[in-house]
Image: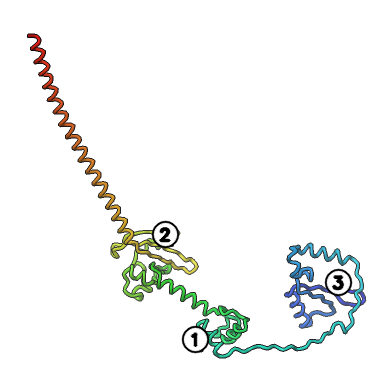
Amino acid sequence: MDVPDTGYTCLTVDGTESCRAALDDIAAGSIHRCFLEMSACAGSCIGGPVMEKYKNSPVRHYQAVVRYAGKADFPVPAAPDSSLVRHHTYIGVTQVTPSEAEIREILAKTGKLKPEDELNCGSCGYNTCREKAIAVYHGKADISMCLPFLMEQAERFSNNILAHTPNGILVVNESFEVQQVNEAAMAMLKIARESDVLGEQLVRILDPLPFLNVLSGKSVREQRSYYADLKRYLELTIVHDKATHILIAIFRDVSAEEEERLKKEEICRQTVDIADRVVEKQMRIVQEIASLLGETTAETKIALTKLKESVANERDE
């Protein structure tokens, strides 16, 4: 909006980023004869933080301002110069500097026990590790704001899992070259030393067919097989991490479970065999008894018939 008889243009700027850009233009001498009304809040005061609870839209905000201001321009008297000036008294800043022992204690919590551990990488936003430790002491930074420490912690956590899990873990790349193997997998697969298989082809220690199936999109989950050369049953699960181009094989030794299952199956089979033999023997006994009863019945019938005939003959005489 142009102000008559002044040659000035009135502009409104809102939002912190827009205000900074306008101030940069003023500092560079790019703006002349302009009256700027700058508001840090987007939409000026009506878009301030208190207004968020009312959940009004920007359009309704603008309409409310237009209705209140009206269409006609009106003069605004200039404020006296004295009202624009205020004197402030310096109150000072008292900041306690931590002792060397306190700084070392904070550094130790992020694994920095020696001066050479202080990488001063700047990933936390501070120039040195000591500056960051002082900021932590004053409550201006969080102790976990250290990328090398977080990476080391994650790696240590991962290594602990690999070292102590009872499951065997074998990692290969998509070319089937062994990248990592934990102690449990070495015991299951009878690998003497880790260096014997690192970088070697998977086919030297395992059948690569399940891994090929996973690469082709098939699922291998809890697949139980008997490994004759290892003389044990293993349950295999393979996970394909496409982001890092690796295949993670997880082994579980189920030899004891399979042997117990086979024992139960053998007991069931023996029980069925015994039942079959008992039934067969009982049927044979029944048949023998029936045969004996048949013979006895026939003999009795013949004897009675002869007796009957003998009595009949005596009557006739």
Viewer-nearest residue: 79 or 22: 79
The location of residue 111, given as percent across then percent down, is 50, 82
User: Could you tell whether 298 is left or right of 198 in the image?
Assistant: left
Callout 3: 10 Å neighbours few (<14), some, many (20+)?
A: few
| 277 in relation to 73, above or below | above
Residue, disc 1: 113
| 109 in relation to 45, above or below | below
Q: Secondary structure under badge 3?
A: loop
Pick whichever of labels 2 and 1 is earlier in the sequence. Answer: 1
Residue drawn at 36 percent across, 72 percent down:
183
What distance separates the C-alpha of mark 1 from that of mark 3?
64 Å
Q: Amino acid at mark 2?
A: Arg
Q: Which mark is residue 221?
A: 2
Residue drawn at 63 percent across, 88 percent down:
96
Q: Amino acid at mark 3?
A: Met
What distance separates the C-alpha of mark 2 from that of mark 3?
71 Å
Q: Nearer the viewer, mark 1 or mark 3?
A: 1
| 142 in relation to 284, above or below | below
Q: Amino acid at mark 1?
A: Leu
User: Could you tell whether 280 is left or right of 192 in the image?
Assistant: left
